[in-house]
Image: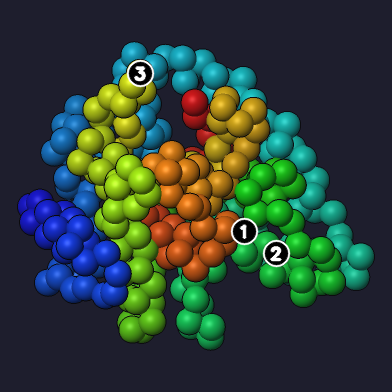
Amino acid sequence: MRKFFYAATMVLTICLTGSFAIASTPAEELAEFQQYYLDKFPDTPKEDFINGIYSIDAASRETFDAIEEFAPYEIDVAKGEEMYNKPFADGSGYANCFAEPGVRHLYPQFDSKSGKIVTLEGAINACRKAAGEKPLKYKKGAMTALTAYMAYESRGNIFDIKIPDDERALAQYNRGKRHWYQKRGQLNMACADCHLNNAGNYIRSERLSPALGHLTHFPVYRAKWGGLGTPHRRIAGCNEQVRAKAFKAQSDEYKALEYFLTYMSNGLEANGPATRK
C-alpha cells in the first residue's frame, strides 16, 4: 500500500534532479495516496478532508465552524461577483471566457496546444489580456476576490482533474510529483515530510495538515495574512519556512505542483473559499 510513497521519497532523496520512474500509473498513485490518509486517520470520512487540519483536529474544529458562520471572506466574494459581471472596456467580459463562474473545480488543466498547465488564475489573466485589460497580481488582492467568487459558485462540484493521454501531460504531472517529494532549503525538507509522513503531528504548537484536500478550498483567508491568498502564495510561504528560495507565482514549478496535488484530491468537493490560521 505504501510502497509508492517510500519508493518515491527514496528516489527523490538520492536523485534531486532529473526524471525518475516508478511502476505505478497516476490512477494507481491517486488510489494509494488517498488510501494512505484514510488508513492514517480512520475516524475522518473521506469527504471531510476538504476541511484541512480541521478534518483531523477536533479541538479546533468548533472554532473553525463558528468562524465560517460569519466568514471574513464574504466581502471578497461580493466584490468578486461585481468584478466578474462588470464588462471590460471592449464590451466583452469573463462570461466570454468561462461557461459559468463556477469553474474552480475544473482547474488546473493541461493545455494540449501549449503543452503547459493552465491554472484558474492564469486563465483569468489570459481572458483579461485578450480583452486588452491589465493582468491582475497573482498572489492576493483583486485576483483573490475574483477567484473567491468563482470558488464559491463552484461549491459542491467534484474535482476530476484530467491527465490526458499525452506524454507532455504526464511529464507535467511527474514534475509536480518530484517537487512534492524533493528535499529543499536549509532545513532539507520536502512537502511530503510535513504533509504526508508527519501529517497530524505537531510542529511547535500547530498540527500539520494532511495533503488530501489541500487545494479544494482555495483561495483561503488566513488570519496570519489578514486577507485572502492564492495557492501559489501559500506554497511560496511553505518554501520560505524551510528556508528555500520561493519560485514566482505561476511559475512552471508551482503550476506543476498544483496540477499534481489537485489531481490527488480528485473525487472531493470544491469548498472554497475557506478560512485557515
- Local packing at callout 3 (Cα closer than 10 Å; few below 14, some 14-19, many 20+) is few
Residue 40 appears in which quarter of the rendering? top left
Residue 58 appears in which quarter of the rendering? top left
Q: Which residue is mark 2?
A: 125
Q: Which residue is mark 1?
A: 121
The amino acid marked with disc number 3 is Ser
Q: Position of residue 216 (x, y in %)?
A: 44, 46
Lateral position of residue 228 relative to residue 2, left or right: right
**Contact check, label 2 and label 3, Cβ < 8 Å:** no
- Would residue 29 be seen by someone viewing this image from the given angle? no
- Local packing at callout 2 (Cα closer than 10 Å; few below 14, some 14-19, many 20+) is some
Q: Which residue is mark 3?
A: 205
The amino acid marked with disc number 1 is Glu
Residue 93 appears in which quarter of the rendering? bottom right
**Contact check, label 3 and label 1, Cβ < 8 Å:** no
Using the numbered discs, state the Cα–Cα distance from disc 2 to disc 3 in whole angstroms. 38 Å
Residue at (49% x, 76% y) in the render: 116
Q: Position of residue 17 (x, y in %)?
A: 30, 69
Mark 3 or 1, closer to the camera: 3
- Secondary structure type for disc 2: helix
Using the numbered discs, state the Cα–Cα distance from disc 3 to disc 1 in whole angstroms. 33 Å
Mark 2 or 3, closer to the camera: 3
- Would residue 228 be seen by someone viewing this image from the given angle? yes
